Amino acid sequence: MKQIALFERGIDPTPLVEMSGDYGQNHYYIKREDMIPFSFGGNKARKAAEFYKEIKKCGADVVMTYGSNSSNHCRVIANMACAMGLDCHIISPQENREILYNTRMVEEFGAVIETCPVTEVSETIDRRVEAYKQEGRNPFFILGGGHGNPGTRACVNTYREIAAYEEQKEICFDYIFHASGTGTTQAGLVSGKLLTEDRKRKCGQTVGEKKIVGISIARSEERGREVVRQSIEEYLGSEYQTLYREEELIFTDAYCMGGYGKYNQDVQKTIEEVMAKDGIPMDSTYVGKAFYGMKRYLEEHQIQGKNILFLHTGGAPLFFDLMDKKWETERRQA
Ligand SMILES: *Cc1c(COP(=O)(O)O)cnc(C)c1O
């Protein structure tokens, strides 16, 4: 079977395992979305699989998206377009132009990268989409970070895999923690939970007290929550009114540690601990930060003896950027 057929027939459930390290007085499990076997995996690969179907359906010949050219999203989309034999056009903000491993890969996949000031993003996108159409081409535009219904649907699948694991192993997770950025992952998990639990209730089954906690990696609580809620509303459609409950949406900005991508020594220590004890790489922008945030959250809320699931959302190439930075700093200090 061809590699890209992975997207055609749907992704296999990602590994879910108990962690070996002692990260506090709870039972820790981890779901490895970083092990989706395409372009270093991660939630962007999971979302891409859904966009793949949409792109095929409408017969697009150029895949367009928005995002930093050093992002996981742009790497995966550029890689997918390349693998599909399609052109890829990325609109990227002029600001924040770090050259990371993701940036180099995006270039190697042959994507066209068009930069513009962040204030002119939507005009630039509109203009470029129009220009392609004028040329008689059929562009498919994917929102930044794989936001939107196909992205949410992808993460509903993640929740379904978690629920299937619980059923099979006769275990209930009390908490699911994950890094929350554009909010699509959280919207998918919460929607998945609402739909699954509704079905269980209708069959007279009891449902657990599971909480899904999004650790914000940049956004404020107010804005972050609202975006997640909107995505849930968009995804659930007519079922939103009956299924959605405010208290299902837990989103905390207490562990942003100075904002997007900001370096923090405690996060770095946590990443080294997880790598040493469990052999699992984490980056410092998303996953390591969220894992560290989870540890603090559990301490601060005095949560003990619970089954905790951490969702590893990917970003493997960023792990190597972090190592490079550490080495560079050490060399400079030596
Ligand atoms: C994009 C990303 C996230 C955030 O996911 P959202 O769906 O945007 O909230 C988390 N972790 C990694 C590694 C990511 O690349």
Image: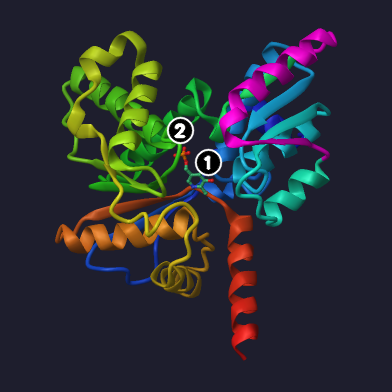
- Looking at the image, residue 252 lies above or below residue 53: below
Q: In this view, does 52 lie to the left or right of 224?
A: right
Q: Name the residue under label 2.
A: 155
Q: At which x and y percent is residue 147?
A: 51, 29
Proximity of marks 1 and 2: CB atoms separated by less than 8 Å = yes
Q: Is residue 272 magenta?
A: no
Mark 2 vs ligand 1: CB under 8 Å?
yes
Label at residue 291: none
Q: Colour scheme in the image?
A: rainbow
Q: Is residue 58 left or right of residue 271?
A: right
Q: In this view, does 227 lie to the left or right of 315?
A: left
Mark 1, Cα crowd under 10 Å, few <14 / some 14-19 / many 20+, is many
| Amino acid marked by disc 1 | Asn
| Amino acid marked by disc 2 | Cys
Q: At which x and y percent is residue 321?
A: 63, 63
Q: Is residue 125 magenta?
A: yes
Q: Residue at x 21, y 56 (%)?
A: 306
Highlighted range, magenta: 110-137
- Looking at the image, residue 43 lies above or below residue 330: above
Q: Mark 1 points at which residue?
A: 43
Q: At which x and y percent is residue 172?
A: 25, 45
Q: Residue at x 62, y 42 (%)?
A: 68
In the rendered image, is residue 51 in sight?
Answer: yes
Quadrant in which the C terminus appears: bottom right
Q: Is residue 130 left or right of residue 15?
A: right
Quadrant in which the N terminus appears: top right
- Per the picture, the main secondary structure of the magenta-coloured stretch is helix
Q: Which residue is drawn at 36% across and 56% down?
A: 29
Q: At which x and y percent is residue 156?
A: 42, 29
Q: Which of marks 1 and 2 is nearer the N terminus?
A: 1
